[in-house]
Amino acid sequence: MADSVLELKAVDRRYVQGPKELVILNGADFALRSGEMVALVAPSGAGKSTLLHIAGLLEYPDGGDVVVNGTSCAGLPDEQRTAIRRSEIGFVYQFHHLLPEFSALENVMMPQLIAGLPPAEAKERAAQLLAYMKIGQRAAHRPAELSGGEQQRVAIARAVANAPLVLLADEPTGNLDPKTAGYVFEALEALVRQSGLAALIATHNEELAARMDRRVTLAEGKVVPLPE
Ligand SMILES: Nc1ncnc2c1ncn2[C@@H]1O[C@H](COP(=O)(O)OP(=O)(O)OP(=O)(O)O)[C@@H](O)[C@H]1O
């Protein structure tokens, strides 16, 4: 395994807005080491989602490279980027993006079935993950029958269902009240620590950010450390 499971190398991202160019990332470098949890803390509009989408191979940078577990993704064909994303990266969004017509269990099984796992194995792993997230008793419920905190716990279980190396989370507790956010973050943290995943988590929540191994922010298009 490479020392850094995820690297951004001199990543550029600009948006053109009418006559103006909005520079979001400008030669941004970042390395996420195996097993570490890093908080990305920056004001609204600074580019956190942009950085996570590029790191998660959901968007292309205008320049630079994303290296996932030693594999350079610049110039890779779409199918290979998708394959790397599916096997190595789990994504949690602020809003759960669960499939409404499927149960919690089926939602967590889905990525595993897409990856070709036999249904019985996918089901067993999904049930284990939901139990680990303390939501096993809600496995048969559809997303609309779950609370916001429960939906996010299912979304987290789904994100790690394929045993990725890296978890990227964009304000995973941003939509929850502080108490529920605390519970959900605790479950997320326990899962990340237990499975040895590396995680980059964008959050506005200073208290949660302080619990991670280190904190970074965005300044002038670059990723810079925040003081301890
Ligand atoms: N497709 C796009 N076209 C033009 N501008 C965009 C596009 N996507 C994002 N932006 C702009 O880029 C900037 C960074 O957006 P981004 O969503 O990455 O910020 P953020 O730090 O995640 O913000 P928030 O905390 O509010 O979610 C914002 O000013 C946004 O308006």
Image: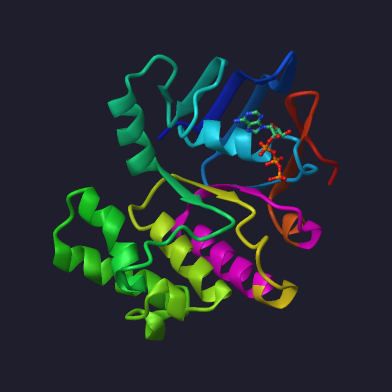
Taking depth in this image into account, of 25 and 226 the one nearest to the observer is 25
Q: Is residue 7 left or right of residue 73?
A: right
Res 100 quadrant in image: bottom left
Question: Is 188 one of the magenta-colored residues?
Answer: yes
Q: Does the magenta stretch mainly form a helix, a strand or a loop? A: helix
- How many numbered markers are drawn? 0
Taking depth in this image into account, of 225 and 185 the one nearest to the observer is 185
Q: Quadrant of the N terminus?
A: top left
Query: Could you tell me residue 194's position as x and y percent?
Result: 48, 62
Q: Is residue 204 left or right of residue 166?
A: right
Q: How is the image coloured?
A: rainbow
The single residue placed furthest to the right in the displayed view is 227
- Quarter of the render that holds ligand 1: top right
Q: Residue at x 24, y 71 (%)?
A: 124
Q: Is residue 175 left or right of residue 227?
A: left
Res 73 quadrant in image: top left
The single residue placed furthest to the bottom in the displayed view is 137
Taking depth in this image into account, of 207 and 47 the one nearest to the observer is 47
Give, as a single range, the part of the protein colored magenta: 181-207
Whether residue 199 is situated above or below residue 46 in the rendered picture: below
Whether residue 51 is situated above or below residue 167 in the rendered picture: above
Query: Could you tell me residue 218's position as x and y percent?
Result: 76, 33
Query: Could you tell me residue 83's position as x and y percent?
Result: 30, 35
Q: Residue at x 63, y 75 (%)?
A: 183
Whether residue 127 is situated above or below residue 209 in the rendered picture: below
Q: Is residue 169 left or right of residue 97?
A: right
Q: Residue at x 69, y 50 (%)?
A: 213
Q: Residue at x 39, y 47 (%)?
A: 164
Question: Is 33 one of the magenta-colored residues?
Answer: no
The single residue placed furthest to the front in the displayed view is 18
Query: Could you tell me residue 101's position as x and y percent?
Result: 32, 68
